[in-house]
Image: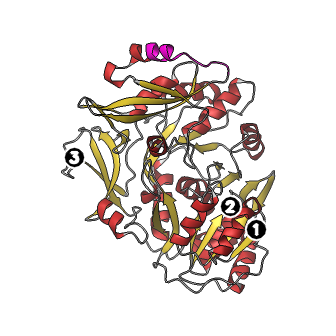
Amino acid sequence: MRLDRLDKEIESICRRFPWDRAIWFNGVWWSRGAFWGLVEAVTEKLYDSGFKSGMHLGLVMPNCPSFWAHVLAAWRLGGAVVPYNHREPVNAVTSALKHAKVSMVVLSKERSNLVDELNREHIPWGLALYDAPFKESVQALPEYPGQEGVAVIFYTSGTGGKPKAVPLSHLSLYMNAISCIDQVEPIKDGDILLNALPNSHVLGFSICGLLPLLLNLSQCMLSSFMPVKNVLEAIRSSEANVLVGVPMMYQFITSALSKGESLPRRIKAAISGGDKFPFALDEILEKYLGIGVLEGYGLTEASPVVAVNRSYSARKLGTVGPALPIVETKVCDHEGKELPKEHEGVLWIRGASVADGYFEDDGLTGAFFKDGWFNTGDIVSIDDDGYIRLHSRESDVIMVGGFKVFPEEVEEILLKHPSVKEAAVIGVNQSMSGQIVKAFIVPKLDKQPAKRDIWSHCRRLLASYKIPKIIEFVDNLPKTALGKAKRSALREG
């Protein structure tokens, strides 16, 4: 397959079908023609700023038409983009943008608090509205000789360690998107996808934002998932019929539905990634929407989807489905030796959508990328039908007296307690037994449980060595951009 740049593919469909609906945003449908008009206006603005091939454009914005117009404009001029979570603190944002060697940054008005720090670091910036190019007269920094073919550099920390910068090519993003459409049977031409995940994260960027622009699909774009009442109204108004989210999003949606909110039964698919999907939540989703979940699994390094359940008739609950046809998998022990089928071990992957390494970090690249394979660090097992069951991150596995404890298993049991709203589990080192299990629990507002009730609940459902020995009640948990608990932050205290 021949593909030069994603922007050419998107320009082609916008010019061929200018009246087709592209993006629903703030109650208004943007046609493909109107959206491409914004792309051209941004391209002119970037060109006048001296942005050109090989440069990196930083983007610190929520989901909006302007975000995607700046992405495509940078691609048209031969550059790459560095989207960063607009909710992150100032020092985290500027540190990443410096590391990525951006030539300039475009901010939304909510992040004008970055301006002073960007000025101190001598990084040019411009402020953009949700539906227009950046306003300021900006002169980009001298050209940075970026890697040929790179479309986006994403920052990810996974579930532990310092943030890693992952460069993804136009081809890898394209191949992953096309493979996903071929794999997920319910999605058809003309469907409308919910785009409420942050597009600064690869799942939101690639599947919710990029994929509909590339294909004969539309998207309901939201700058924020909260409040959930607005999300439900947007789904109803836009007639979105394919939901893409993470477990936390579905928890909020079903909670709102249980309190009287409504969604039409036209929704044909609910796809989830980013974290393990609880069995109980699938039952609740089916009760209110008439469908359960198609669970998938991915990584930033894989552009991002590795596997997904194909259809409701073929899905296997508790698995993330089979790998995409373009992704090869193997399961290895901790030394990298391949294990027989159905054995539990570390997942390694390779394929057209898998990155080649980390941006300007030979040490990390050498540690995780070997002979064309990428070590995901995830503990899995694969059954005879090729369905992958995700157990835990290698770095999160807790060793208690020589026995493995997967945090996700304990967390799922804790969430079954009627007074537990959220839970995260880590291992705490002890000299005698190696580690013990510690649980952080966010209680429901009016149901603060006694610790003895939690222990009693766990004793009924867990082996003794898996029961949390320490329970700490907290107001909230540190989260990733996708709402997944940051166990690394909890371990660091």
* Residue 414 appears in the picture as rendered: yes
Q: Earlier in the sequence, mark 2 or mark 1?
A: 2
- Look at the image and give the residue range highlighted in magenta: 446-457
Name the residue type under label 3: Asp
Residue in front for this viewpoint, 234 or 159: 159
Q: CA distance from mark 2 to mark 1?
A: 9 Å
Residue picked out by circle 3? 333
18 sits left or right of 484 in the view: right
133, above or below 93, in the image: below
State which quarter of the image contains the N terminus.
bottom left
Q: Residue at x 75, y 29 (%)?
A: 261
Q: Residue at x 47, y 25 (%)?
A: 471
Query: Residue 205 at what x, y percent from top left?
Result: 58, 58
Task: Classify 10 Å Cα crowding around label 2: few (below 14), some (14-19), many (20 and above).
Answer: many
Res 269 → quadrant: top right
Image mark for residue 183 = none
Query: Residue 446 at what x, y percent from top left?
Result: 67, 19
Q: CA distance from mark 1 to mark 3?
A: 49 Å
* Secondary structure of the residue carrying numbered label 1: strand
Residue picked out by circle 2? 61
Task: Classify 10 Å Cα crowding around label 1: few (below 14), some (14-19), many (20 and above).
Answer: some
Res 325 → quadrant: bottom left
Q: Does the magenta run of residues contain 437?
A: no
Q: Earlier in the sequence, mark 1 or mark 3?
A: 1
Res 491 → quadrant: top left
119 sits left or right of 449 in the view: right
441 sits left or right of 399 in the view: right
Query: Residue 452 at what x, y percent from top left?
Result: 48, 14
Residue picked out by circle 1? 128
Q: CA distance from mark 3 to mark 2?
A: 41 Å
Residue in front for this viewpoint, 449 or 432: 432
